[in-house]
Amino acid sequence: MNFGVIGYGYWGPNIVRNLVGLEGSHVLAIAEINPMARARAQKAYPGIKVTESAAEIIKSPEIDAIAVISPVWTHYDLAKASLQNGKHVFVEKPFTSTTGQAEELINLAAQKNLKIMVDHTFLFTGAVRRIAKLIEEGTLGNLYYYDSTRVNLGLFQHDINVLWDLAPHDLSIMDYLLKTSPEAIVATGEGHLNGHEDVAYMTLYFPDRVIAHINVNWLSPVKVRTTLIGGEKRMLVWNDLEADEKVKIYDKGVQITSREGMYELLVSYRSGDMWSPQLEQIEALRQEMHYFVECVESGKEPFNDGKAGLRVVRMLEAASESLKKRGVLVEL
Amino acid sequence: MNFGVIGYGYWGPNIVRNLVGLEGSHVLAIAEINPMARARAQKAYPGIKVTESAAEIIKSPEIDAIAVISPVWTHYDLAKASLQNGKHVFVEKPFTSTTGQAEELINLAAQKNLKIMVDHTFLFTGAVRRIAKLIEEGTLGNLYYYDSTRVNLGLFQHDINVLWDLAPHDLSIMDYLLKTSPEAIVATGEGHLNGHEDVAYMTLYFPDRVIAHINVNWLSPVKVRTTLIGGEKRMLVWNDLEADEKVKIYDKGVQITSREGMYELLVSYRSGDMWSPQLEQIEALRQEMHYFVECVESGKEPFNDGKAGLRVVRMLEAASESLKKRGVLVEL
Amino acid sequence: MNFGVIGYGYWGPNIVRNLVGLEGSHVLAIAEINPMARARAQKAYPGIKVTESAAEIIKSPEIDAIAVISPVWTHYDLAKASLQNGKHVFVEKPFTSTTGQAEELINLAAQKNLKIMVDHTFLFTGAVRRIAKLIEEGTLGNLYYYDSTRVNLGLFQHDINVLWDLAPHDLSIMDYLLKTSPEAIVATGEGHLNGHEDVAYMTLYFPDRVIAHINVNWLSPVKVRTTLIGGEKRMLVWNDLEADEKVKIYDKGVQITSREGMYELLVSYRSGDMWSPQLEQIEALRQEMHYFVECVESGKEPFNDGKAGLRVVRMLEAASESLKKRGVLVEL
Amino acid sequence: MNFGVIGYGYWGPNIVRNLVGLEGSHVLAIAEINPMARARAQKAYPGIKVTESAAEIIKSPEIDAIAVISPVWTHYDLAKASLQNGKHVFVEKPFTSTTGQAEELINLAAQKNLKIMVDHTFLFTGAVRRIAKLIEEGTLGNLYYYDSTRVNLGLFQHDINVLWDLAPHDLSIMDYLLKTSPEAIVATGEGHLNGHEDVAYMTLYFPDRVIAHINVNWLSPVKVRTTLIGGEKRMLVWNDLEADEKVKIYDKGVQITSREGMYELLVSYRSGDMWSPQLEQIEALRQEMHYFVECVESGKEPFNDGKAGLRVVRMLEAASESLKKRGVLVEL
């Protein structure tokens, strides 16, 4: 399977490195507008054609699939042109700038019988896979809440705010784990420097009183990557910055009991052992690229397909609307 | 100065212990409706009168001041009766259930020339005092955001939700540090057990694009007490669970510069040393009780007076209104 | 059972508080030479006789047992006199200054049919009890090593070095867990201030190639209380400063296999889950005092008896000898 | 400057990568006996000659310097042959298996006017450079102790014990920081698997009552890389596993004062702020390779020269002797 990669900035080199290392995949060409990045690409991969022109790659008859690793606002045009030229597409997250664009691409791919995969890399980590398994097996019981903090200093983006930059990670994970869509979204935030929000908060109301919250911030002096998931039976902390013990499951819970003749309900706590399962040691991105090749070759629809990308964009779009009005409730 | 203490549940014993240990203060009586708590009080303090009747204490001519350490919904009636009987009052946080009640008590105290102090204990900790000094001296520069996480397992309250239980700490600290009031508030949350919200989030929009956020949760498997404060010059992390090094100041910042002829602004990062100042080793509550006695005796108005209590209640009231409507923006 | 307590300095108040709170035990008298400490004792316990004279207590016919909570060099004389006067004795660790003294006291108690208990408080903590159970049940497999770090800033002792001050904790725990005695001891260290070693290290060679090591230090800027125990099957970390998750068991191991025809042995690693059991929430000292009363009343020999105290003193004595010669091997 | 690299196992690839990336240096050839490692080298560097024969490289007239990155027991022969063939040598730590070998190589290099550099990589890290500066500037005052813990699970070595594997890091750092040599060494330890010690402890007595201690262990379930350095004025903790804040300086101290008429000395504690300086962000190995090229070209003697390597081997040799006799004191 022959790949063309568009974009060799921050993330592109990782995509190329993994595609090059993957059995059955070849990178034929890289397109990049920044001349310094082009020089780096050419030095690292003397055997790959490096060009300024994305169009050249998109039109190349030798290329089967295009990886679009460029800024968000370019995704729609590049992916559309790729699909129109009969290429499968792998698109960086977030999928597109609007839900309309996402829907159009999904339809186009369906007509052309081509695959879209959106780069929700975290779904391929040992941590998320294990958490998904714990939820599926009922280890946590019915879920109560999902609460993620994803803060650090920078990197500021010039075309998008902190919500579009960092929240797609959480939204795609949440979408994968909760297997349901939010009913309503509230987002608040503030920008202090270049007009884009650099601090933002997002609440998502899911069915059955499940609530999710995301705290993203480009102005934090410390890096935090922590998610709490509370369930009826057990609770979980995922700290992605821990070298080992990233996921800890607490045998803790709260129960409501009513004593006869008592006018008030009693809350009782249960506290037990903590347990940290060993996670698969896999490079998530490599796993994801392998899965893309597999899906294209077998015709299987990836779980992180255009529709998954659309669901994330829909949440971001609703959050943007809410944010603009300082936290109005946006129903979905 | 002679004290009567109403309420000997979770927090009352700490109030009594500190008042007993304080030079110039005497506890003459304790009122408590729970017979088991009364027995504990009497055993610990054989010399203090322990009674079921709050009214008895409030009317006692020997008593100068009443400490109201009972559930929130009783604060207004007990404080009002105390003031009407010519007693100074020390009231547990949150001050009252409504702003109307708070205003009435403030007016009544003014008429009677009596003092009200609201138990915003955190304002007397070494950490908050030091942070206040850092902000006043301009060490952080103009503030960008205030972000607090205060989560743990329980203790569930039966009469109030998690916001009224835990957020008063943050709101009183924020009020003290920012020295300004929010323009608008958004609160979201969900209840899973007894009808009261057990997970809640609150965003406060302050003037000059300062944003504050509070994350409170009774269903967290781990205890977190962390506040991030971002400023133009420096940023700060306060982790109240650290034995030492509770407050860390980071010489980190972000600056916007515009290069001539460039259409886009450049964001530059600055990163320097971290510094953790030694904090005063004081028992906050003891310090606060001492300050109450001092204010009553000198006629000085405490900074944590009824008006400070009112400001916190106003924020809670607005948050409740927002929460009820799943996150509507409430302007103040 | 009526107690007399000798010594009301740093640790004595904890002993008195626990004995007072314990059903079936009464503190009749406290002896203390420091007048300020005597005043504190009398203020806290108006109903207890407080005296300067230890002899007075030792001779009192109403007293059944003496708790000796004074400096190490006084233990022998006070315990001996107590036993001679027919009292059971509870002695602060380390038991005595020499093995000779310990043996004499053990024999005297045996003749008089009296009990000696040495205050090895840690043996009554939830952590040590759980670790003991894990070892007994074979969860760790055959043990490889025991490695403890116990460092902090001060408190400097004037009559003993850091080894006699801090190592008794580790030695008593080790004695309890390993259920065997060391064959040889090496101790190194240095003193920088008042002539006593303030930094010291101790290696203990046990049978079957089990090795133990203790790192004690009065000059550390940070407090550390961490013990690693390595076994054939699993390994354990006990961090006593953690609020929760004090004990963590790692399903990790190393195995030696020999491949046919290979001249070298292969070491293979096994890595699995981590697990942190919930520990009993007990106040160790209360548990210990209760056990002392129970042993005296039932005639049962405590496991932390004079012989356990002697074993610890024997290790300290050997370590002192080694330390004096800068680390000579002392065989036991 | 043209390099030949001998050994492409665990560390060799890092050496090659850095030499390739360095301006003014070229890697002409790699020698490696393992065919699989040779294949990896050839694939990664198609332009470099990869051979089985070290001799071929050592004799190549085009090569100016040899990097010996093979097992310890091969260092002497390979370095000697390289020097005899007029090559400068960069040798992996520990320098040689014996002090005799080290001395011979030093003399040979001196005769031939060639440079030897021993790969004490840590000396080029931001952390060690900063600590050295703090000591030189007197920030810590006179030193009291140096205490390092370097433990983890594996990697077991087949030809050397844990002391020869891990302690060279600490010994080279200590040698660099303390700028003096130990007077005596005591080492203890035990082996549980393949005949080599896998757990070991080392005490070094330096002049002026400075004591150093190293704890190395291949059987620890957790990875620890922590060094405490205690000084008269301040104390320091270096935790190399922290992403940020690797070095923390504590304004803490202990002082001895004698009060008039008092028979005992008083120890007083001083406790102040903690401070964590920002460290240089450099890749240590790159810095070191650059320094090697610079030394060779300028004729400057590197501070991590053969003599520095010899000092480390001398300490290891003494430790081995002590270890064999279960902790006998070996004077240097």
Image (cartoon, coloured by chain):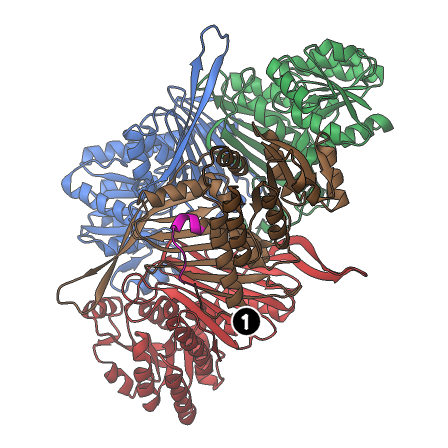
Chain colours: A red, B brown, C green, D blue
**Viewer can see residue D280:** yes
The relative height of residue B212 versus residue C148 in the rendered view (above or below) is: below
**Location of residue A86 by image quarter:** bottom left
Give whichever of A109, C287 is nearer the camera. C287
List x then y, in percent, for residue D296: 18, 42
In the image, what residue occupies the spot 57% across and 36% down? Answer: C147
The answer to whether residue D10 is visible is no
List the residue tagged with mark 1: A177
Q: Quadrant of residue B151?
A: bottom right
Locate residue B251 relative to residue B160 in the image: left or right: left
- Vertical placement of residue B324 versus B209, above or below: below
As drawn, which residue projects farthest toward the right? C298
User: In x, y percent, where is residue B331?
Assistant: 43, 66
Give the secondary structure at mark 1. Answer: helix
Answer above or below: position of C159 versus B27: above
Q: Residues within 10 Å of mark 1 (few under 14, many from 20)?
A: some
Foreground residue among D315 and D138: D138
Residue type beneath disc 1: Leu
Task: Say if D103 sits above or below B258 in the image.
Answer: above
**Residue stretch rendered in magenta on the structure:** B174-184
Residue B117 in the image: x percent, y percent? 52, 43
